[in-house]
Amino acid sequence: MNDVPGRSPTLDDVAAHAGVSTATVSRFVNNPSVVAPATADRIRAAIAATGYIPNLLAGGLASSKSKMVAVLIPYLTDSIFNDTIQSMVEELSGASTTVMLGLTGVSARRTEDLIRAALSRRVDAIIFTGPVTPEVEAMVRRSPALFIEVWDLPKEPIGLAVGFSHEAAGRDVARFLMSRGYRRPHLVTASGTRAQMRRDGFFAEWPAAEGSALTESSVEVPSRFGHARRIFAEIRRLPDMPDVVVCGSDYLAQGIIVEAMAAGLRVPEDIAVVGFGNSSIAGEMRPTITSVEVDGARIAREAIAAIRKHGSGEPLRERWIDVGFRLIARESA
Amino acid sequence: MNDVPGRSPTLDDVAAHAGVSTATVSRFVNNPSVVAPATADRIRAAIAATGYIPNLLAGGLASSKSKMVAVLIPYLTDSIFNDTIQSMVEELSGASTTVMLGLTGVSARRTEDLIRAALSRRVDAIIFTGPVTPEVEAMVRRSPALFIEVWDLPKEPIGLAVGFSHEAAGRDVARFLMSRGYRRPHLVTASGTRAQMRRDGFFAEWPAAEGSALTESSVEVPSRFGHARRIFAEIRRLPDMPDVVVCGSDYLAQGIIVEAMAAGLRVPEDIAVVGFGNSSIAGEMRPTITSVEVDGARIAREAIAAIRKHGSGEPLRERWIDVGFRLIARESA
DNA sequence: AGGGGCGATGATAGCGCTTGCATATGCATT
DNA sequence: AATGCATATGCAAGCGCTATCATCGCCCCT
């Protein structure tokens, strides 16, 4: 099957086999419609006969575009981004771009290493979520790669930001709970910046009205199911039980519900719960979980549309794309 | 900061700046210890001054090794592999290899495309899980990339297999449940091959003893939390209630527990539940979930050790690495 | 019939790095 | 002093593509 067993076939092999120049084969590979139909057929046959697989390292070097984008997120496990990543990877693969995945954790050092690695591969874009250190900013600014911050809308994005206002989301949740008559919310906030912003929004909106009280506790990022035991224990020790627990993720919300039920409480009658992210489980849990929906797929699409534009030389017109969010009231609150 | 603003600095720029040849800089970058300390210092300074970032496309082309490995899995969301992937990506990044992530879904077509894409990047290895079609096998066999099938131990691995016997795992669960006195198990099997193997193992082991009955239902892969409603409804319609539900993932097990509790049943007294994979939630759920632990981190380590060996020219001695599994009895069964 | 334009193809100079080979230097050995 | 052998560095030929420019027919228009 393989004409030259020792080494993998190259463009030259295909060209020789098809009786055309390498340039023509290259053109065919990148855009079949520019070669004459008859030639195309011969090349196609030659490719099949030789078992040719393009070498994108060489291609990328020559064209200085890698058709590769880096996706850098903090965690994979139980992560609120999972749905977004899933769509992102699907969309990108569909557009025949390779996804380089990096897990930054909370370490700035690691983030830097990953950015450097991405830049080393001359990625077309870096999709990033998390705090940007000055070092990272410096590296990224002088590179031609498009830098896309997702899930948030920083005041001064380096490249493009695709996300929503966490502060506004926090406010919305506060208003919703007030309107439902809750008076004693307990916030569980993860140490990450975005969660803090939602918390601040909530606090800003919550009225210091009579009979209303606001308590809180914190967890390490990410807001996981497993944190629920400790948090619930903390809540029970509070002098006055809160009437609703506001969580940083649906997983944590799920955990709180499980704990509450194990303690013999009813949700939402005895204690209500609000999640965040509208993960698939939110609608599947019993009771179903009131949550804030973020359109992860849309974030993915917008990011990729921007990458495509940027790739074809078009300058980006906007610096922020606000995809908004939507509070979905379900059974848990 | 950047000496030549228009284009990103190359090895030549650094070499000129440090007053050495490009070869020396290249050697320094790849293995600092081979250049004289004084030279090393000058080069280090030159790199800092120019803001040089190596171009791995060029490097890979020249050395025909990309320091990149492809990780191809079916899903990300709620996936039983999440922990494995997490460790895999961490380990790989630590070894300064880039991870190319591909989501195959259940489509053979897509799998092929992803394998082709990986091969196009001249990845050093492909870490794969899922069924291997003849087309994929053909492509992979003629490439120098190491092909590692994880999570399973196929009879004839193409390259290396790192996993465990699903059939044995199924048998173990069966024996465990018998010993605990369960008599009416209900199996929930996902349509994937590995889940089928566990099921077959379970069936082979389960005795057709008197008073014992075996029922089953099936779900699409992956075995998700969300399937629980339908499955539980199915179970309730059974003429005789099973005494234990055996699930293909801890997420599904979690879902069954939630459904059972919502229906007013006690777990495990009224109905017991067994999960699979020992995801973090297994030990955190209430009740904690009896599950089969698979050492995902070990799979990751073994795979990466093999890649490193393969990279340094050593031939692989073994074709299978059995990491085993361990049934962890907890509260749910 | 001549010229212009266009579509299809070929020739070829890099893209930025690695690496085998050659060279140079220093030091221990005879 | 002559020899040998590490060790440190330079030279230069590619790695397999892409993209620019040039060439060649061929058809259409005047």
Image (cartoon, coloured by chain):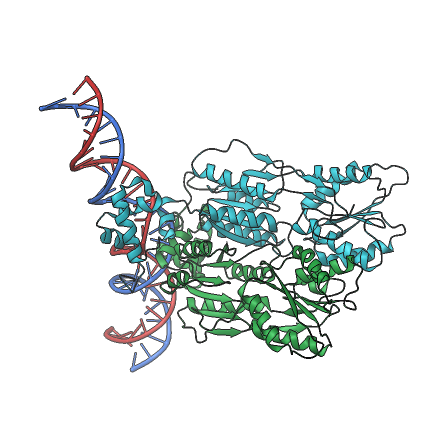
Chain colours: A cyan, B green, C blue, D red
Total numbered badges shown on the rendered structure:
0
| Viewer-side residue, B300 vs B276 | B276
Name the quadrant of the N terminus of chain A. Answer: bottom left
Q: Is residue A75 left or right of residue B321?
A: right
Q: Position of residue A222 (x, y in %)?
A: 67, 53
Q: Position of residue B72 (x, y in %)?
A: 50, 58
Q: Is residue A247 left or right of residue B153?
A: right
Q: Is residue B255 visible?
A: no
| Viewer-side residue, A234 vs B115 | B115
Q: Position of residue B219 (x, y in %)?
A: 61, 59
- Which of the 4 image quarters holds residue B86? bottom right
| Viewer-side residue, B197 vs A29 | B197
Residue at point 53%, 60% (across, down): B94
| Viewer-side residue, B71 vs A136 | B71
Q: Is residue A116 visible?
A: yes
Residue at point 87%, 36% (across, down): A209
Q: Is residue B4 left or right of residue A208?
A: left
Name the quadrant of the C terminus of chain A. Answer: top right
Q: Position of residue B301 (x, y in %)?
A: 54, 68
- Up/down of B39 relative to A319, above or below: below
